[in-house]
Image: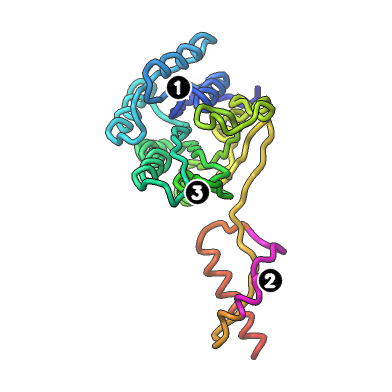
Amino acid sequence: MTIDLTGRVAIVTGAGGGLGRSHALALARHGARVVVNDLAAAACESVAAEIQAFGGEALPWTCSVTDRDGVVAMVEGVIHQWGGVDILVNNAGILRDRTFAKMDLDDFALVLDVHLMGSVNLTKAAWAHMRDKGYGRVIFTTSSSGLYGNFGQSNYGAAKMALVGLMQTLALEGQKFDIRVNCLAPSAATQMTEGLYSEEDLKGLSTDLVSPGVVALASANAPTKTILLAGSGAFEQAHITMTQGIFVGERSDSADQIEGLWGRIGSRDNERVPEAGSAQYTHEVAQRTRALNEIA
């Protein structure tokens, strides 16, 4: 193995089972010391014991990612015990699936609280430490449900797409401190997905097939601002792109022009992946300038 995480300290949330357990084991096998975080103490201790059994270092830590004080205490405790935190794997999550028409708003808020604010809580607790040491690797767990939508998962999809927006900005803010921030969109069979997959599908959906992506995103040579899709041993990348679009200008029929030119507006010829949100404004001003120059 060429990726060596020896000396690095990783916190993995929701690590008592499923994807989190696989991530924790994979990071430990590459040399990282791993904090196994989960709500269930027995589950944390079990996974930590697995890591210790093959000679790795692991620390079980029980707290909810929605408990800000508990998360701060965990980060501070880990820094005190192991000297720092280098890698965050924000994996903890829940499901409360229903169609939007039938969904209780408390269930909508709860899913956002766990997935989005849980990730914010941990990352915020470690962010200043990572800035001070000039190093960090932060991984958010997004989902194809957020990227592309999924029936009955408006709350989950909203939370998962919000994490992409969080990643986009934190990657920019962390760049000069060598804090690299990425998203993982896993496809795997876990307790959360029970009943969603057929027996045939389950054969290739081991959580262990996703975790190599986490190791790569946690490495010294990790990219930043990347959305990595992973499942069944396959890996892809998703992009938030911007098309070239059209210039309509100030016309009385501007709305009609837009309605009639959806095909040109949405054409993916020469589309781009903007480096930052300001690229939209810059592009649109350039479009206007070119159009006015042509008229002149």
Work out how far the residue at label 1 is from the one at label 3, CA to CA, in angstroms: 25 Å
On the picture, is 14 further left or further right than 231?
Answer: left
Residue furthest to the bottom: 296
Label 2 neighbourhood size at 10 Å, few (<14), some (14-19), many (20+)? some
Towards the viewer: 188 or 200: 200
Label 2 SS: helix
Q: Say which quadrant the C terminus sits in.
A: bottom right
Residue type at tag 3: Met
Towards the viewer: 36 or 7: 36
**Residue 249's spot in the image, x, y percent?**
57, 82
Q: Earlier in the sequence, mark 1 or mark 3?
A: 1
Count up the numbered dots.
3
Residue that carries the numbered disc 1 in the rendered image = 16
Q: Are marks 1 and 3 in contact (CB under 8 Å)?
A: no
Q: Residue at x 47, y 47 (%)?
A: 99
- Residue 176 visible in the displayed image: no
Work out how far the residue at label 2 is from the one at label 1, CA to CA, in angstroms: 49 Å
Residue that carries the numbered disc 2 in the rendered image = 264
Q: Earlier in the sequence, mark 2 or mark 3?
A: 3
Membership of 271 in magenta stretch: yes
**Residue 136's spot in the image, x, y percent?**
47, 36
User: For residue 130, what is the image quadrant?
Assistant: top left
154 shown above or below 19 = below
Q: Which mark is residue 161?
A: 3
Residue type at tag 2: Arg
**Residue 35's spot in the image, x, y percent?**
42, 23
User: For residue 211, what is the image quadrant?
Assistant: top right
Q: Residue at x 40, y 41 (%)?
A: 111
Q: Which residues are magenta?
A: 257-272
Work out how far the residue at label 2 is from the one at label 3, CA to CA, in angstroms: 26 Å
